[in-house]
Image (tube, helix red, strand yellow):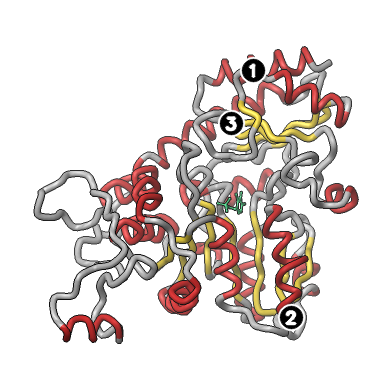
Amino acid sequence: MPDQSDRPSRTLHPETLAIRTQTARGAEREHSTPLFLTSSFVFDDAEQARALFTEEIAGNIYSRYSNPNTDEFVRKMSLLEGAEDGIAFASGMAAVFGSMAAFLRSGDHVVASRALFGSTHQLFTKLFPRWGITSSYVDADASADVWASAVLPNTKMLFVETPSNPGLALIDLEMLGTLAADQKLMLVVDNCFTTPILQQPIKWGAHLVVHSATKFIDGQGRVLGGVVVGSAELVSELRFFIRHTGPAMSPFNAWVLSKSLETLSVRMDRHCDNALAVATHFEGHAALDFVRYPFLESHPDHALARKQMSAGGGIVVLEVKGGLERARRFLDAVELLSHTPNLGDVRSIVTHPTSTTHSKLSEAERVQVGIVPGLIRVSVGLEHRDDIIADIEQALERSA
Ligand SMILES: *Cc1c(COP(=O)(O)O)cnc(C)c1O
């Protein structure tokens, strides 16, 4: 459990909390948090060892349970999301899995948004059914009544991503928060696309917020990580599951990710400014069928985006005219932008969901979530926006 004594006052702003929430200074009087590469921690005496193991006192025992670096990272994430506590995981998928597996049992049912990260979809369709856990999908744009009618007597949880990957469809978090409260369901939100800087699901009634820290939180494409935050009560149940199944984040990754959080707010501002510039520039372009970005007025959920997000995020979706073949030529024609499946990096990235991240879905499943063959996901990075725009322009021209 994190030591609360040096926790800054809650009246500080998120930018300050992300920088000034720090592990207590050690004997070396270091300014920046050191890396605690240690698997275990030494007991002062037999009595302390006993009390730590019975959890009568809080403190480090073994790095599968806790470590100063993972604690610092988790404390920052909890403060940014407005949560009481949290747990760090080795990857985003370990966090997604843990957020459900720790609370569900055989016979339970989950209602989820249809447009989900590829591996989350595999969890619902291939792995959970092995353990008797079933699920139903609802379209992101479905009405409150449709969401409510998907709830069965054995439904325990609602699980959603908003905006969705890669279609950028939005789900009304306030509506889901009300449904969860009325029906006594757990609402779990994968907040990876927005980070707590742009959207805080707990404010709207979410019980747990899940992140792949690999994306915008790292922000430089270096390490994998995941985190789940929520109420102290739920996190303590999750902690039991994590302690005994072992998907702990490495202290090294936690150290990197905690440093990354110091600049998250500044980076998100620039990601959003650049993405809006790219979306605005290419909207109506002759080589494209559409451009989708939550803060463009043409986005079907623009009003909702303005309500629950403070900016549009770093992802822009383009559909090139000419379908699959044109999309492939476009990917081979980009020069500056990287062609890789990651997102949220300082380097701008293009990804073709049909042939890569969502290739395991059937054609019909892809169409249901808006993934057409000409769709290109652009993760807009922090290069100068004119250079990003110029590279996309030349690639569109050369792929004609
Ligand atoms: C990448 C991603 C994940 C999985 O995270 P990893 O760190 O790659 O395991 C989960 N959800 C969303 C929305 C993602 O983009």
Count of number-bearing discs: 3
What amino acid type is highlighted by mark number 2?
Answer: Gly
Q: Amino acid at mark 3?
A: Val
30 shown above or below 161? above
Q: Which mark is residue 388?
A: none
Can the viewer see residue 297 in this picture? no
Closer to the camera in the image, 50 or 110? 50
Image quadrant holding the N terminus, namely: bottom left
Residue 85 image point, x, y percent:
39, 68
Which mark, residue 335? 1
From this view, report whether residue 159 is shown above or below residue 281.
below
Q: Nearer the viewer, residue 302 or 131?
A: 131
C-alpha gap between disc 3 and disc 2: 40 Å
Is 47 in front, or is 202?
47
Please determine whether, in this image, residue 395 is positioned above or below residue 339: above
Along the polypeptide, which appears first: circle 3 or circle 2? Answer: 2
From the Cβ of disc 1, is ligand 1 less than 8 Å away? no
Q: Which one is in front, 77 or 123?
A: 123
Residue 68, by quadrant, is bottom left
Q: Nearer the viewer, mark 3 or mark 2?
A: 2
Distance, label 2 to label 1, CA atoms, is: 48 Å
Secondary structure under badge 1?
A: loop
Quadrant where the C terminus lies? top right
Mark 3 highlights which residue?
A: 380
Which residue is pictured at 47% across the width and 45% down the height? 223
Alpha-carbon neighbours of circle 2 within 10 Å: few (<14), some, or many (≥20)?
few
Give the SS element for disc 2: loop
Confirm if mark 3 falls within 8 A of ligand 1: no
Q: Earlier in the sequence, mark 2 or mark 1?
A: 2
The residue singled out by tag 2 in the image is 132
Question: Mark 3, mark 1: which one is toward the viewer?
Answer: 1
Badge 3, how many Cα within 10 Å: few under 14, some, many 20+? many
